[in-house]
Amino acid sequence: MVRRSPATFRIAPSLLSADFARLGEEVRAVAAAGADLVHFDVMDNHYVPNLTVGPLVCAGIRPHTTLPIDVHLMVRPVDRIVPDFARAGANIISFHPEASEHVDRTIALISENGCKAGLVFNPATPLSHLDHTLEKLDLVLLMSVNPGFGGQAFIESVLPKIAEVRKRIDATGRDIWLEVDGGIKADNIARVAAAGADTFVAGSAIFGSKDYAATIRDMRSRLGK
């Protein structure tokens, strides 16, 4: 396994846990607090049992930050909405293989629309979807909770899965991000990094704290150790 320096770690606050009544202010606040990107969860009440936000909200927050917007699509079907999010200012678009009839085609669609492409795996989704797609991806996102709601506890059995994806990424020799989303907090972020992750989505741990900057500093400190 390639050892990563603290400088390669990225923290992505999830807007799912932000105060939606003042979303632009929240985006500016986490950017000022030291976030590396903004994670934008899109749920359709079909693929997952919740309904959140769409391209108009993404376009609305785009002027509030220069940070990359990391869009996680939990929608089915997925292809129709990809160009809308690209136009709305997304930099990264990730989707679940179960939500696409043709995974390779969806990856190509994201790239053709000028965004980095990511593939997302739920805790019980097999990694076989990477067998013929990894070389075309910019990011692999592993869910460490079952998608649909914020504030869930980290599923420990995902740690070996993170390690397996890290081996696959390292074998390619490409700079593919390995992101983990779900139950990430200061007290477990170092273990998730040790398993192989380099990008960490944190929702309630950051937006539920009184001091965003202090929370992000604490996470980076633990990653540094």
Image (cartoon, rainbow, N blue to C red):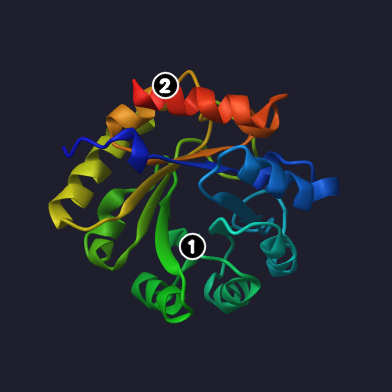
Task: Point out residue 97 in the picture as x, y percentages from the top left corner.
Answer: 42, 61
Q: Which tag is nearer the camera, tag 2 or tag 1?
A: 2
Callout 2: helix, strand or loop? helix
> Relative to 190, is 219 on the left or the right?
right
Q: What residue does disc 1 label?
A: 92
Which of the 4 quarters of the picture holds residue 55?
Answer: bottom right
Callout 1: helix, strand or loop? strand
Q: Quadrant of the C terminus?
A: top left
Amino acid, disc 1 = Ile
Task: Point out residue 38 in the picture as x, y percentages from the top left corner.
Answer: 58, 50
Amino acid, disc 2 = Arg
Circle 2 packing at 10 Å, graded few (<14), some (14-19), many (20+), is some
Q: With respect to residue 168, does 174 lie above or below?
A: below
Q: Nearer the viewer, residue 101 or 200?
A: 200
Q: What residue does disc 2 label?
A: 222
Question: Residue at left 37%, top 56%?
Answer: 139
Q: Name the residue furthest front.
A: 32
Task: Point out residue 202 in the picture as x, y percentages from the top left corner.
Answer: 56, 36
> Relative to 107, is 168 on the left or the right?
left
Number of labels in the image equals 2
Does residue 151 appear in this view?
no
Q: With respect to residue 137, does 195 lie above or below?
A: above
Which of the 4 quarters of the picture holds residue 69?
Answer: bottom right
Give the mark, 2 or 1, whose residue is nearer the N terminus: 1
> Relative to 165, is 64 on the left or the right?
right
Disc 2 to disc 1, how far (Cα)?
A: 26 Å
Question: Residue at left 23%, top 40%?
Answer: 164
Question: Residue at left 23%, top 65%?
Answer: 135
Question: Residue at left 72%, top 58%?
Answer: 53
